[in-house]
Amino acid sequence: MPMPIALDAPYETLTAMITPAIFLTANASLIISTSNRMSRVVDRIRVLNDLLDNMGRGVSTHDYVVERVEHIRDQLQRLEWRNDRIRYALTTLYIAFTTFVGTSLALAFDVMAGNRLIALPIGLAVAGVGLLLFASVNLALEALEALRTNRLEIRFYRDLFDRRLSEGRGPDSTAAL
């Protein structure tokens, strides 16, 4: 049996419809920052692809070409993995955004239907929060890989520097790096 709609129900409904806006705002912030992360990864991939292409054509003036090519290939593989995590997160965030908008609309429809659809807005809200969790896990994994990749890159260039010094090709001062 449907519940009667009280006189203050429209205001309660509007208040309830605004509640998902908190999730929408948080979600939108994640979408923006994730898009920026994706742009940085894509830019880095392009730089490394150009460098690898130049080395492959003998255009580069870099030393230790074999080692650098191996390092670049490893970096590109790691960037590809990071790009996948970001893609999963971004797709999930857009779907979560949709569920939060759906939650807001479902709350209004539920009131119009005499509270017969209460499971719909609750289900959409739970789904949206679950999607946010999935996206956040992917973003955390991507961030950890970014830090791991930075450490590997630092180690690679320190090793190159040390190798030049040991071969007598580096600067006279060993105080750098």
Image: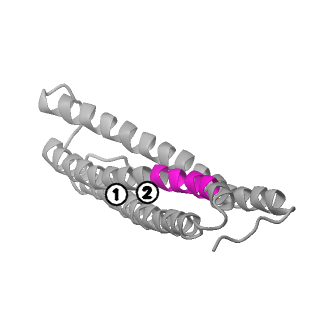
State left or right for residue 65 relative to residue 41.
Answer: left
Q: Which mark is residue 51?
A: none
Looking at the image, can residue 30 be seen? Answer: no
Taking the magenta stretch, the answer to whether it contains residue 89 is: no
Q: Which mark is residue 177?
A: 2
Please give the name of the residue rendered at 16% of the width and 41% of the height, measured from the top-left corner.
65
Task: Decide: few, some or many residues near mark 1? Use Cα within 10 Å; few <14, some 14-19, many ≥20.
Answer: some
Q: Secondary structure at mark 1?
A: helix
Q: How is the image coloured?
A: one colour
Taking the magenta stretch, the answer to whether it contains residue 95 is: yes
Looking at the image, can residue 33 be seen? Answer: yes
Position of residue 68 measured from the top left corner of the image (x, y, whole percent): 21, 46
The quarter of the rendered structure image containing the C terminus is bottom left
The quadrant holding residue 69 is top left
| Up-down relation of residue 55 to residue 152 (above or below) | above
Q: Identify which residue, 80 or 29, lies in the foreground.
A: 29
Of all residues, the one furthest to the right in this rendering is 7
Q: Which residue is mark 1?
A: 158
Position of residue 13 measured from the top left corner of the image (x, y, whole percent): 75, 59
Earlier in the chain: of badge 1 and badge 2, it is 1
Position of residue 21 measured from the top left corner of the image (x, y, whole percent): 68, 55
State left or right for residue 9 relative to residue 138.
Answer: right
The quadrant holding residue 32 is top right
Q: Which residues are magenta?
A: 94-106
Kind of residue at disc 2 = Leu
